[in-house]
């Protein structure tokens, strides 16, 4: 059953938050995405750009060591450094101005 009021939305007993309820700056956005087959030194482009440079964290998949990091971010994307070269698949989180 759907229940809607000026302060909450409930669907089958599960409540949902409004954007204003989230503990983040309303002028910022958070993007989490996956990029596959990224080469060392390669560029990852955000699906929707930020209005200015965000902070970015990248993590590669698998059971191996954490061997990569994001560098040179700008409002459209970032570059990826892989310690031992090669290519990898990553999950990344970027937070910055809408």
Image (spheres, rainbow, N blue to C red):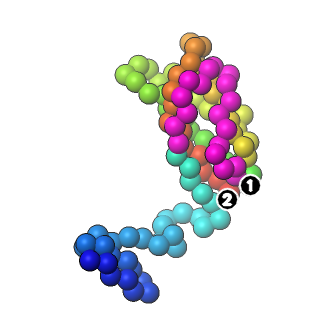
Check disc 1 and report its element: helix, strand or loop. loop
Depth check: 69 or 91 in front? 91
- Magenta highlight on residue 46: yes
* Residue 87 x %, y %: 56, 18
| Residue 45 seen from this side | yes
* Residue 71 x %, y %: 67, 32
Q: Are marks 1 and 2 in contact (CB under 8 Å)?
A: yes
| Residue 55 seen from this side | no
Which residue is disc 2 drawn over? 98
Left or right of 11, for residue 52: right
The disc at residue 51 is 1
In percent of the image, x 37 and y 77: which residue is there? 9
| Residue at the far front in the pictured view | 1
The quarter of the image holding the C terminus is bottom right
Distance between the alpha carbons at the discs numbered 1 and 2: 5 Å
Check disc 2 and report its element: helix, strand or loop. loop
Depth check: 91 or 4 in front? 4
């Amino acid at each position: 059953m759907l229940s809607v009021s000026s302060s909450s939305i409930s669907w089958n007993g599960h409540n949902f938050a409004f954007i204003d309820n989230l503990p983040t700056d309303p002028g910022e956005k958070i993007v989490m995405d996956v990029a596959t087959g990224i080469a060392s030194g390669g560029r990852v482009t955000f699906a929707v750009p930020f209005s200015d440079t965000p902070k970015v964290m990248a993590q590669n998949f698998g059971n191996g060591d954490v061997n990569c990091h994001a560098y040179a971010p700008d409002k459209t994307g970032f570059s990826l450094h892989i310690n031992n070269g090669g290519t990898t698949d990553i999950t990344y989180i970027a937070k910055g101005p809408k």
